Image (cartoon, grey):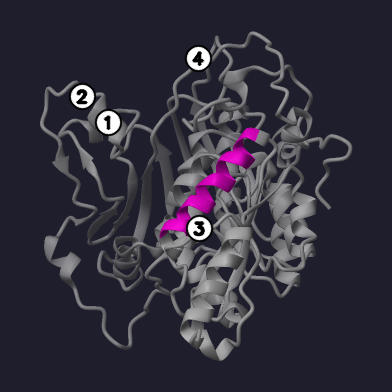
Amino acid sequence: MTNRRSFLKTAAATAAAVGFPTIVPASVFGATAPSNRINIGAIGVGRISRGHDMPGVWQYTNVAGRDNRIVAVCDLSAHRVQAAQKLVDDTYTKKLGQPYTGTRGYADYRELLAQKDIDAVLISTPDHQHARLCVAAIKAKKDVYLQKPASLTIAEGRVMANHAAASAQIVQIGSQQRSWKQFARAVELVRNGRIGTVREVEIGLPGDPAGGNPQPMPVPAEFNYDAWLGSTPEVPYTLDRVMPVQGFDRPGWLRMEQFGAGMITGWGAHHVDTAHWGMNTELTGPIEVWGQAEFPKSGLWDVHGPFKTYGLYENGVKMTISGAFENGIKWIGDDGWIFVCRDGMTTPTAAATPTGANTPAATANSGGAEKPVPIVPLRASNPKVVDSVIGPNEWHAYTADDHHGNWLDCVKSRKTNIATAEIGHRACTTCLLHWMAMKTDHHIHWDPKTETVKGDDIAGSLIARHQRKGYEIA
């Protein structure tokens, strides 16, 4: 005679193998019952999704309170859809200890969003698709984890943030530094006056190389290139403009201004957000921005090269962003400075190089001449400041043990998440203002309340871009 436990185990294995959910009473599973599980769709399943976003959520499979299942994947490359289906199926086969082939694949994000059993989505597409797809997901009443930067332009970022604010959906921007302990700790020290009044902030970013092959090529048969271009102009297909056909190496579109602004938004969205957090300017922005940059004179890739730009805030703080600084954020006050960056390894001289700073590439490019050393991610002019105790009556940061985990927590609780759409939009806006200064070489006067440029039609014209018919954000 089959006992209850054996029946449930057999039913679960059968259902997983054919791709159907297991329907059993919630009381059997308790907090990880299917009725408590968050069903997730992944839109855009390339390098970032496979290496960061999907693992970020599936690590909590069968974890009470954060239990989720990626039930569908979507991409404009049929090859990537199939590869993602296999990756998710194989992952759940290992996690669940039984065969699993239940992951659905879609070529059109609208079909995925129409699925009633999907509660939330990961959006891990190229930058130029972020805001439009996020708005579509919000309208479909899905909670959203949106890769940074929040948008390609300031105008579409404002549309996205407004839709998020007017909805009941949880929108988490992928500014994961907010959920790293050293960044929250640095912000608390700064906000509680451990270096006195902040006067300046220095942000160091890595760089991107020039190059790229502009020669037009046939569009792969399994790739919807027109939809991939989205709202941006029609241009000939070439591999270095888009992404690898095979494999998931760093794509060329990251170095194309048609699809993003380069490292000023790529890493800048992280660091400016952290800087704002420490400056208490998360919901506003600079009032003046200026500076210069070098741009490639040949090749396909056209995002900025070496640069130095400045921003002035209403509270008098001056922000300087450059590739010549160490990769990280440094607040400078009347009584000293605090610096914070990511964990990792670097060479002793890497911090002084214009490009990099604190990335595996910096170590790899050293040629082995210098032994890599661990980065100290949190430092201060007075080392005792780092160990300073934040008292119960002082300001305490909103903290999370994990960025994807915080999103899942808030999807369940409906409480405010750690990186909201408005916060992400303000950080992205600041980065784009620095980009606008690079492009125009103008001293830009910005009104963060109305989000308009004062007295400069040329700079003001960069707030928005023409959107190709059929791909407009609404």
Label 1 and label 2: CA atoms lie apart by: 7 Å
Asked if the residue under mark 2 is in contact with the one under mark 1, i.e. CB atoms within 8 Å, the reply is yes
Label 1 and label 3: CA atoms lie apart by: 41 Å
User: Is 474 left or right of 360, judged from the image as shown?
Assistant: right
Which residue occupies 52% across, 16% down? Answer: 296
Label 2 and label 3: CA atoms lie apart by: 45 Å
Identity, as a three-letter code, of the amino acid under mark 4: Gly
Observer-nearest of 423 and 54: 54
Identity, as a three-letter code, of the amino acid under mark 2: Ser
| Disc sitting over residue 211 in the figure | 4
Identity, as a three-letter code, of the amino acid under mark 3: Pro
Magenta stretch prevailing secondary structure: helix
- Residue 53 at what x, y percent from top left? 50, 53
- Which residue is label 3 attached to? 99
Q: Secondary structure at mark 4?
A: loop
Residue 334 sits inside the magenta stretch: no
Residue 82 sits inside the magenta stretch: yes
Q: Earlier in the sequence, mark 1 or mark 3?
A: 3
Observer-nearest of 97 and 372: 97
* Magenta extent: 79-94
- Which residue is label 1 attached to? 362
Q: Is residue 466 visible?
A: yes
- Which residue is label 2 attached to? 366
- Residue 111 at what x, y percent from top left? 79, 53
Q: Earlier in the sequence, mark 3 or mark 4?
A: 3
Within 10 Å of the Cα at label 3, are there few (<14), some (14-19), or many (20+) other Cα atoms? many
